[in-house]
Amino acid sequence: MFYFFVADSGEMTLSPLIDDKHLAEEAEVLRPGLPLSFAQSLLEEIDEQRKGPERGGVWPLWGGCSREKAEDKKRDGAWVKRAILRTLKSYPGLREQNWRWEKGNSPEASWQNELKDNLRSITDKEGVQDFLARTEGRLLAKADLERLGQECGLSYPEILNLCHEQARKGDAQWIPAVTREGKGWRCERCGETKVEEWISIYGPAATCPACTALGAVSSLHELYRSGGPSQTMVSSSTEADHLSYSSFSGCGNIAWEFSPRWELSPAQKLAAQQVLEFVKEGAGERGVIQGRNVEKEVLLWAACGAGKTEVCFPAAAWALEQGKKVLFAAPRQDVVLDVAPRLQGDFPGLKLSVLTGTSQERFTPAPFVLATTHQILRFYQAFDLIFLDEMDAFPYYGSTALAWGMDRALRTGGKRAYLTATPSRESLEKVKAGRMELIRLTARHHGKAVPLPQWRKIGGSMAPEHGCSGEQGEKVLQWLKELALWGPVLLFVPKISWVNPWVEILKKEFPQWSISGSYSADPNRTEKIAALREGRFRIFVCTSILERGVTLPNAQIMVLEADHGVFDERALVQMAGRVGRTQENPTGNAFFLSRQKSAAIAKAIYWIKEQNELAFAQGLIDN
């Protein structure tokens, strides 16, 4: 809640603090408080009434507003207070509220008295700098600020006081979480416009349904939005051990080095150099981005299993040396948790913040942030360089809210690199139109071609109730047996309801093998996949949950009803990409079974074939 302060002169201001000592003169405060959005509109309405339409206007809301003295007693503080109460009581839902004006230093503000006793804990320079480091470039709701207080060892009132001090200085803002936009609404955290509208005692209100995973927000809630890091960059060090002189306060003077644990393959080196050149382009002698609004994007299109993540590390290291702040984001938590130890291994000494829905700490100040795309909604103009892995994966792909968050997290003049083995149609169109650069990583680290999937025609449905009957069933079981003799088989099915029935069918057909399966809502999913990674299953039936992020030695793939609508070309490429990923087993088989060779199947096979041909032409693979 925010509180109205009115001085005898008629000066008005808003504050989240009941006892705001920053006012230029003693003022009275209106109790109880009001939602920020309603208080802002009320403040503007009163100011217009007082000054008249020709003199009304928009002015700062913190640290003293409408400082011009009233020309007569009709527009002094007493008049303003009466006008505010009169306007409030015009709302049916607010008439019965116990509105009252009190001195700003009212003893009823008990937590403010506690705050005065504890000011020492937040006024020391080190403590304030820690707060600034943890909140720089952030967009935080009340629940986030309360959690920040827990991490900092400060009470919520103390955090509130620090936040408002930054707002008064102009280094941060208080904004309504959901704001009016024309006749509609927009969430200021995720950009969603399809909100749930309802009537509150303050009039029309709206709640955002798109970002509730981070905590519900409505037009009656406020967000604290702090500024991003400084524009100033410093030149890189020529020594082996670098100092990260991040403008991100609290991260500076931390010794680290970029020390890759293994050498990149020729294909990776070529792509890494291109990514580095993209990041460096437009930077001045001291690493400062030249000009404004120079946002650039690049698409790193890699073969499945080509090691695209490590390709980005040299560019990230260069950016960090310049004092830039870097983000590596991915839609799925398991990817984030997989990349974290690889980053820590290649960047010893570097402070890294890892943010997922289960992270214990969310406000660790660090120059390099690794996060799921949902967590990026808590950032605002915070990063100079963003790497987005698996841009075509759920839940990021198709989410306007997450795309909005990614846009808002990037600073003006910042750069973005999209990493994927299966680019979306939209990204390829941007490349074709010249609005996005393209880098190809065509070969896997072991220098062998990605095994080309085989399409095999079947005559009817592969639903478990009749999938194994007749000649067709015998043929499918024979193909499956052949694959299983090569190595562990991932059997992809288009429907969750098919998983368990197919597991039972195969257990009867192949009693000599250990067989299991899983799907997204399987309560034992984690344990089963862990067992799969340990090599305990010969055949594993699954939905598309395993199309990404799983590497099994000598894996073989079969996709039932590959022409089903749920399997687009990107999903099929990813499934086929589970084959031949390791140095020890660079070959394997992927079978697409369907009644017809759909456009998605044809395109998936073409993509892999074209990638292999390009890699061969570049001399990066030997077959």
Image (cartoon, rainbow, N blue to C red):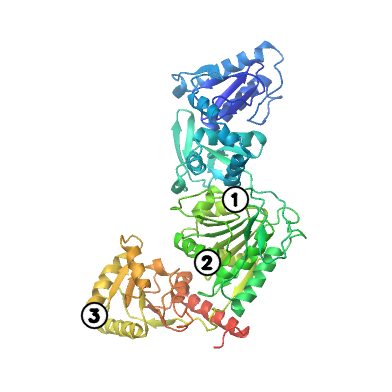
Residue highlighted by disc 3? 509
Q: Quadrant of the C terminus?
A: bottom right
For marks 2 and 3, give the CA distance.
41 Å
> Residue 29: x and y, percent?
56, 21
Which residue extends farthest bottom? Answer: 623
Q: Residue at x 56, y 39 (%)?
A: 224
Residue highlighted by disc 2? 342
Rendered position, 397 above or below 200: below
Q: Nearer the viewer, mark 2 or mark 1?
A: 2
Q: Amino acid at mark 1?
A: Arg
Q: Amino acid at mark 2?
A: Arg
Q: Earlier in the sequence, mark 2 or mark 1?
A: 2
For marks 3 and 1, give the CA distance.
54 Å
Which residue extends farthest top? Answer: 73
Q: Which of the pair 130/620 is nearer the observer?
A: 130
Assess whether mark 1 and mark 2 are in contact (beta carbons under 8 angstroms). no
Q: Which of the pair 573/371 is nearer the observer?
A: 371
Q: In the rendered image, which quarter is residue 37 located in?
A: top right
For marks 2 and 1, give the CA distance.
27 Å
Q: Is residue 250 left or right of residue 529?
A: right
Q: Amino acid at mark 3?
A: Glu
Residue highlighted by disc 1? 408
Q: Residue at x 53, y 71 (%)?
A: 421
> Residue 411: x and y, percent?
65, 52
> Residue 176: x and y, percent?
55, 37
Rendered position, 199 above or below 483: above
Rendered position, 268 above or below 170: below
The kind of secondary structure element at disc 2 is helix
